[in-house]
Amino acid sequence: MKNFTVSDKFEGGNIIVDKIEGNDVYIKPDFRDSNPWFSWAMKVEGANGLKLNFNVERPIVGRFGPQATVGYFGPAVSHDLKTWKWLYPENPVTEMDELYHFTYQFGENEDCVYFAHHMVYNVCNFDFDKQYGLEIKELCKDVDGTSCPYVTFGEGDKVILLTSRHHACEAPASYVLHGAMQELIENPLDGFKIICVPFVDVRGVVKGDQGKGRLPHDHNRDYNYDEPSIYPTVKAIKEIVKNNPIKYSFDFHDPMSAGSDKICIVNHGGHWEQEDQRLSELYANLSAEYDGAFKHVQGSITRIKTIPGMFSTYVGEDPRVRYATTIEAPYYGCPENMMTEESYKKSGRAFANAIRQLIKEIDK
Ligand SMILES: [Zn+2]
């Protein structure tokens, strides 16, 4: 048997290799300092010409039970860590009990292939400096010295704050944010300045951490009015909120693995019910109009109780804020509404235009 290696030594990498027996590779997500979660990303080198079977152990996540580690369309596959494709988009597997394994035939010239639970979006993917000439500035340094980037654009005395990756592993949401950013740069919103912090847990993004359920609490539980935050990037965002007239705020996330297949708007504790409903209606109509966009289904609203320390709760309590919400974009979608880099970016454009329309209606 030819020697090949499986590792997570790259930006966003995360894997534990349990054992390799012939052509069978047994792996699992590395939780590190987080509660059990299902994100993983690995690099396989030197497997040219081999056909390997990968078994990815399914973690048990609290009351939600065993989670899928391989999506309906197989793992996401990349050769450059920049663009990703599903392994079998045409032949989805939807039986929950099968969502943990896949087989890959390596070509003779495939020296290095990346596989992941979902399409990864690393810091280099946020290339608004190259694509749009925006200056990527440093918000602060994270605990390990990693630079946390942010950008601003647009002119106006009101501010929209866009954030993502409070949970490091939630990369698909970044594609939606990316599309929303493109739309708002190309067609500016009159009277608004936009501040975007794309990687709140930037250290976790670079290291490939789960981030969700990080202990003692994760970045999306680190916003309290009365207590100091433990993460430097959260402290810096609190400063942004304090020092800028934030009127609207949108935070991009991903939900659980298989079974959470719709893009949902999160309603926090019944607050802004009307705005959430209207945003959902606008977003559904606009995403239906975009050819190839991931469709938002009207009324896909997840209701959660108000949780102290959550970013959206924190911003929402600021009396200057007119509307704040969270959106959750699924890791895979479903066979008739599939997540791809392109479908998510187009869906992000539709979301930006839904925001534009909503603001026109409610901004006084
Ligand atoms: Zn999240």
Image (spheres, rainbow, N blue to C red):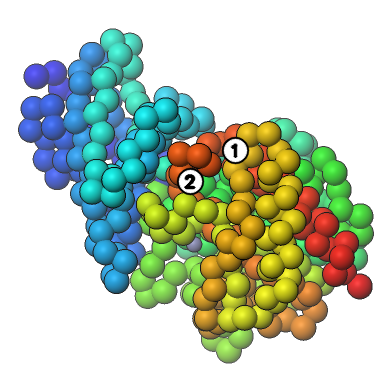
* Residue at left offset 92%, top offset 59%: 191
Nearer to me, 153 or 273: 273
Judging depth in this view, the residue of 122 and 186 nearest the camera is 186
Residue 118 location (% of width, % of height) = 42, 43
Left or right? Give the position of 254 relative to 13. right
For label 1, the residue is: 343
Q: Nearer the viewer, residue 73 or 14?
A: 73
Relative to 197, is 83 above or below?
Answer: above
Q: Position of residue 225 (x, y in %)?
A: 61, 85
Q: Position of residue 122 (x, y in %)?
A: 51, 42
Could you tell whether 349 is left or right of 116 in the image? right
Residue depicted at 37% across the width and 75% down the height: 216
Q: Residue at x 61, y 46 (%)?
A: 295
Q: Is residue 14 visible?
A: no
N-terminal-most mark, 1 or 2: 2
Task: Using the rendered view, name the quadrant where residue 320 is placed.
Answer: bottom right
Query: For residue 236, what is the image quadrant?
Result: bottom right
Q: Quadrant of the C terminus?
A: bottom right
- Tell me how many marks there are: 2
Quick one: quadrant of the N terminus? top left
Under circle 1, the secondary element is helix
Residue under label 2, please give it.
333
Asked if disc 1 and disc 2 are in contact, CB closer than 8 Å, the reply is yes
Whether residue 318 sits left or right of residue 73 in the image: it is right
Type of residue at label 2? Gly
In the picture provided, is 250 more to the left or to the right than 41? right
Amino acid on which the number 1 mark rests in the picture: Ser
* Residue positioned 33% across, 59% down in the render: 37
**Marks 1/2: CA–CA distance:** 10 Å
- Marking on residue 267: none
- Residue 174 image position (x, y, % from top left): 57, 48
Furthest residue toward top: 108
